[in-house]
């Protein structure tokens, strides 16, 4: 059974159909990418999967459970953790604390545990501190652990966001345009990190505009254009798919010509 | 090696500076007499109030203009239960707190769905409503007249006889309040609150139930406010609607921002500063208010993060981070 299953997902904003009956399955252990030109509806799809938006129709199943319409923190609680296209860090918190917050899902304790610090709470804090160090090392940010997160250069902010998401021990990690704003070097570093994350057993779904990153890391790709899925396959198949070429090489007439273009407003 | 930004662990003396200031002022209060003791007592009470408000406005980053409502609940709870019904002060104190917490919970459930300006307006309305009730419900609150003859703080048959004993009790309670604030801040709970202040979408994406944590911070702030209200009633022996009016909101905001919002000792430092500064300026007569305002503005310009953050001025400036050699993050735990 697929870990994530998107079925007939439609997202309508008034007259605009941002996602039109999109469906695909992400197998456990995959690195799966959703690509498409600007405005294709990638981020909307992403928001609908992660619970930030409730789709107009269709359903999203995660590990067999329907998660459509659940609040976002509950979706995250189930093990589906996302990052944002525009980095959303806790700017005033230190790099270390940013990652520590990430452990929220996999730790417990409220006001009473904080006040009286029973043995298990102290052990948990020590565990969080240790795992935080490990994660910072994993993404190469150990040297800046005490910096306020907002002071990091952009590339490192991206890595920090990934480390923080990993702290939540996701089963499925959703990365929303992780390479946006990164230079070639930083993108290569990110690709490396994504592959090593996958190597630890985390399924990765990324929405991406940067073809170099996608072609390098993704095993399977879905292409959407004007809200519709136009192709699905391996990177090699996608590279030569005529509809994909048309969409990416500015062949809008080719797409419009087949008369299937009501969503393009 | 990158120089570290100040944290409570690496340079303890700097973190202890505000603590030393606070304890110094309290000690000064104990060796003084009369009016000075009263002013410092007020500072302790306001310190407790602001420490609570700091949970909601500092750690969690939400705006509440209506925290005076909960101070009024505590104040009137104590006044009515102790003054009219001869309850034990501690019992009245706790019952008022529970009641204020309950009201905060019920009010917070719908109100905290609002954000930014709308939340500020709604909470402001809460303060106004409480104020109106305390004026109009004559049978319970004696309206503008207020309630007098509230006994001093005490437990069972032991009563705090004079202002200095009272000041010791207030200081201890204030320190307890700060201790709770410190413990809660550095925990899973406190991290969740501070995450919400940083970015609600990110907090949600990490599985934090944002609404629930905001509500928790709001209730905690109300418990502190109620405690401060009760202590005020015992300390002065008299309360009226004006005590818990809109002026209280403005004064507590000044304290919070001046002392350092979001820091653990800032609210206390701010409370002491705002209440003591006018006393030092008393000799200036008609210029007093002008100099006071100028001092506040100067402090906000030169210490924008508040007085509690002033210690960091002595720190070496953190250098800009050195980008890691890209493409080669440590492979330490890649499995």
Image (cartoon, coloured by chain):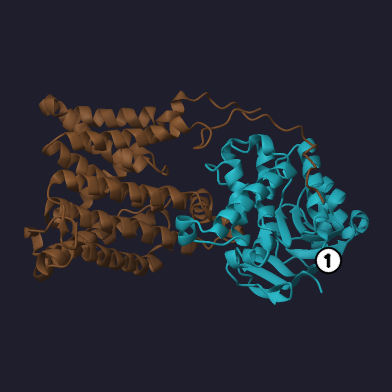
Chain colours: A cyan, B brown
Give the residue displayed 11% in from the left and 59% down from the top: B150
Tell me where residue A233 appears, x and y as whole percent: 89, 62
**Is residue B174 left or right of A162 when viewed as pictured?**
left
Pointer 1 chain? A
Q: Quadrant of residue A205?
A: bottom right
- Residue B8 percent coordinates (x, y): 49, 37
Residue that lies at the very extreme toward the front in this rendered image: B157
Measured from the top left, where is residue B91 in percent x and y?
Answer: 23, 66
Is residue B36 or residue A59 the one in the foreground?
A: B36
Q: Is residue A215 above or below residue A153?
A: below
What is the crowding at mark 1: few (fewer than 14 residues within 10 Å), some, or many (at least 20)? few
Could one spot residue A17 in this view of the protein?
A: no
Q: Is residue A40 above or below residue A143?
A: below
Q: Nearer the viewer, residue A25 or A116?
A: A116
Q: Secondary structure at mark 1?
A: loop
Residue A264: quadrant of the picture: bottom right
Pointer 1: what residue?
Answer: A258
Q: Residue at x 47, y 63 (%)?
A: B211
- Residue B177 as seen in the image, left or right of residue A153: left
User: How many numbered discs sit on the rendered protein?
Assistant: 1
Q: Nearer the viewer, residue A192 or A41?
A: A192
Position of residue A151 relative to residue A10, above or below, is above
Q: Where residue B46 appears, x then y in whole percent?
A: 26, 47
Closest to the observer, A184 or B327: B327
Specify whether residue A38 is in view. yes
Residue A103 in the figure: left or right of residue B234: right
Give me the residue at 44% from left, 31% from top: B14
């Amino acid at each position: 059974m697929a870990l994530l299953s998107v079925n007939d997902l439609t997202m309508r904003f008034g007259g605009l159909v941002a996602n039109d009956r999109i469906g695909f399955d992400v197998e456990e252990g995959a690195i799966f990418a959703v690509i498409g030109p600007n405005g294709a509806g990638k981020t909307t799809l992403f928001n609908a999967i992660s619970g930030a938006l409730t789709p107009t129709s269709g359903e999203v199943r995660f590990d067999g459970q329907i998660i459509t319409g659940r609040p976002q923190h509950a979706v995250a609680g189930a093990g589906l953790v996302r990052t944002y296209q525009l980095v959303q860090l806790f700017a005033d918190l230190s790099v270390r604390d940013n990652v520590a917050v990430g452990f929220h899902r996999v730790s417990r304790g409220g006001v009473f545990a904080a006040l009286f610090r029973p043995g298990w709470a102290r052990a948990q804090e020590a565990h969080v501190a240790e795992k935080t160090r490990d994660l910072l090392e994993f993404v190469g940010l150990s040297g800046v652990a005490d910096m306020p997160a907002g002071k990091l250069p952009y590339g490192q902010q991206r890595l920090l966001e990934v480390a923080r998401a990993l702290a939540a021990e996701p089963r499925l990690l959703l990365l929303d345009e992780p390479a946006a704003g990164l230079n070639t070097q930083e993108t290569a570093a990110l690709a490396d990190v994504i592959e090593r994350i996958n190597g630890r057993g985390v399924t990765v779904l990324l929405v991406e505009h940067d073809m170099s990153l996608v072609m390098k890391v993704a095993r399977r790709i879905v292409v959407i254009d004007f809200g519709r899925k136009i192709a699905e396959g391996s990177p090699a198949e996608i590279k030569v798919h005529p509809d994909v070429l048309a969409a990416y090489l500015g062949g809008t007439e080719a797409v419009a010509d087949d008369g299937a273009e009501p969503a393009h407003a | 090696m990158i120089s570290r930004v100040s944290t409570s662990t690496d340079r303890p003396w700097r973190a202890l500076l505000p603590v030393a200031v606070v304890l110094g002022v309290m000690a000064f209060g104990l060796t003084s007499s009369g009016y000075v003791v009263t002013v410092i007592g007020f500072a302790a009470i306001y310190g407790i109030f602001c420490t609570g408000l700091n949970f909601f406005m500092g750690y969690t980053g939400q705006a509440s203009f209506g925290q005076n409502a909960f101070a009024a609940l505590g104040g009137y709870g104590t006044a009515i239960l102790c003054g009219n019904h001869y309850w034990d002060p501690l019992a009245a104190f706790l019952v008022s707190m529970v009641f204020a917490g309950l009201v905060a919970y019920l009010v917070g459930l719908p109100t905290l769905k609002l954000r930014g300006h709308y939340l500020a307006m709604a909470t402001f309305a809460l303060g106004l409503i409480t104020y109106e009730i305390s004026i109009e419900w004559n049978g319970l609150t004696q309206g503008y007249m207020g309630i007098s003859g509230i006994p001093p703080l005490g437990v069972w048959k032991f009563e705090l006889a004079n202002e200095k004993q009272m000041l010791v009790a207030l200081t201890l309670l204030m320190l307890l309040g700060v201790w709770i604030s410190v413990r809660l801040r550095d925990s899973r709970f406190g991290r969740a609150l501070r995450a919400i202040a940083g970015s609600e979408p990110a907090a949600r994406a990490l599985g934090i139930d944002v609404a629930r944590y905001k509500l928790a911070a709001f209730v905690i702030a109300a418990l502190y406010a109620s405690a401060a209200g009760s202590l005020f009633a015992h300390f002065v022996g008299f309360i009226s609607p004006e005590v818990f009016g809109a002026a209280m909101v403005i004064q507590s905001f000044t304290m919070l921002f001046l002392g350092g919002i979001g820091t653990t000792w800032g609210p206390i430092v701010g409370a002491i500063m705002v209440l003591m500064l006018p006393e030092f300026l008393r000799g200036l007569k008609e210029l007093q208010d002008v100099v006071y305002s100028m001092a506040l503005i100067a402090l906000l310009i030169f210490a924008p993060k508040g007085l509690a953050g002033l210690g960091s001025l002595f720190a070496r400036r953190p250098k800009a981070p050195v980008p890691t050699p890209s493409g080669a993050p440590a492979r330490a735990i890649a499995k």
